[in-house]
């Protein structure tokens, strides 16, 4: 039987790239997100190309009741989830903390932290019962270092890093692997979302250097999930060659 992976935030960017690479590795997939049209298009492509089964689920991880209801009613043939990829996440706004938008803060914490918890809490009991599984949390360099005007986004990703370590400890006796993948700057819709659709501000983020692509992060995850049963990759920090840390990026403008 093919293994099953569930990927949150799979309608674009890193989540979409992960779905494609796991499909290539013959996983049946559950892809989730808020944009059903994109999910259905991706599902159709993966089914046609890789001859796998794909279930598209349309819900917002920020909504606890909706998340619980949807995940509780996964069809029987998709229930035994082997890999959970907590990828759904975002940055909203960019400014000093004294000028910050409370609405933006709540959006980031509800998505990046609480959403990850809601999905994990719904699926982990099945893994503990089967004594197997792998949870991969997509974190960020912002979860390891803090940068000016990144305040609450950095705090949310620091929480992801801490929760990943806590999961690894708590689930150790159940044989469940837990991994954090923390990318540096990746050219996706991330900056466009952060700057509320401002294309000029978003494109400026990636000018003058070569950032990571979503595929780079997906390939790191591919390495993680293809290790033998006795090997767990605790964490991967993956950066563009031009980026040293959150503060230093070499740009040739």
Image (spheres, grey):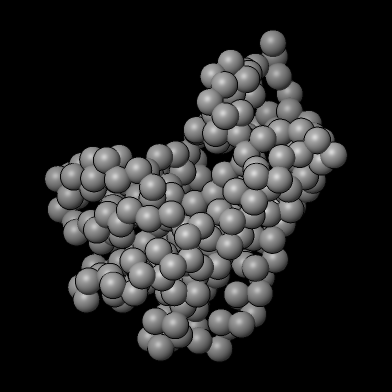
* Depth check, front residue: 19 or 66: 66
Q: Which of the image's four quarters has the N terminus?
A: bottom left
Q: Residue at x 38, y 55 (%)?
A: 59
Whole-percent x and y of residue 68? 41, 70
How many numbered discs, if any?
A: 0
Residue at x 35%, y 50% (from the top left corner): 19
Residue 76 drawn at (x, y percent): 22, 76
Work out whether residue 217 or residue 90 is closer to the camera in this orientation and state it.
Answer: 90
Identify which residue, 90 or 16, lies in the foreground.
Answer: 90
Decide if residue 90 is on the left or right side of residue 103: left
Compared across the picture, whether 141 is left or right of 68 comes to: right
Residue at the (54%, 62%) spot, across then down:
116
**In the foreground, 153 or 24:** 153
Q: Residue furthest right?
A: 98
Q: Is residue 252 left or right of residue 133?
A: right
The residue positioned farthest toward the top in the image shown: 253
Relative image position of residue 177 (x, y in whole percent): 51, 73
Q: Residue at x 61, y 60 (%)?
A: 113
Task: Give above or below for 45 relative to 78.
Answer: above
Residue 53 seen = yes
> Above or below — where is 98 with respect to 138?
above
Query: Which of the 4 quarters of the picture holds residue 251?
Result: top right
Q: Which corner quadrant of the image does residue 53 belong to?
A: bottom left
Can residue 10 be spotted in the picture? no
Where residue 234 sits: x, y (%)?
Answer: 61, 66
Image quarter in which the C terminus is found: top right
């Amino acid at each position: 039987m093919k293994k099953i992976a569930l990927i949150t935030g799979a309608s674009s960017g890193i989540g979409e790239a992960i779905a494609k690479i796991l499909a290539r590795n013959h996983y049946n997939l559950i892809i989730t997100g808020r944009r059903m049209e994109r999910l259905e298009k991706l599902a159709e492509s993966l089914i046609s190309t890789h001859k796998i089964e794909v279930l598209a689920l349309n819900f917002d991880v920020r909504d606890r009741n909706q998340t619980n209801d949807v995940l509780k009613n996964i069809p029987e043939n998709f229930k035994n989830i082997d890999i959970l990829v907590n990828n759904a996440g975002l940055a909203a706004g960019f400014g000093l903390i004294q000028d910050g938008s409370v609405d933006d803060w709540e959006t980031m914490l509800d998505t990046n932290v609480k959403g990850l918890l809601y999905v994990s809490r719904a699926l982990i009991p099945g893994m503990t019962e089967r004594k197997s599984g792998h949870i991969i949390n997509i974190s960020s360099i912002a979860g390891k270092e803090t940068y000016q005007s990144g305040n609450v986004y950095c705090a949310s990703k620091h929480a992801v890093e801490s929760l990943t370590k806590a999961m690894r400890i708590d689930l150790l006796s159940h044989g469940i692997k837990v991994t954090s993948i923390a990318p540096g700057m990746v050219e996706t819709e991330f900056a466009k979302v952060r700057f509320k659709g401002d294309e000029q501000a978003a494109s400026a983020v990636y000018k003058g250097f070569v950032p990571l692509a979503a595929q780079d992060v997906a390939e790191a995850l591919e390495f993680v999930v293809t290790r033998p049963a006795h090997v767990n990759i605790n964490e991967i920090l993956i950066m563009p060659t031009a980026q040293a840390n959150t503060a230093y990026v070499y740009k040739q403008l």
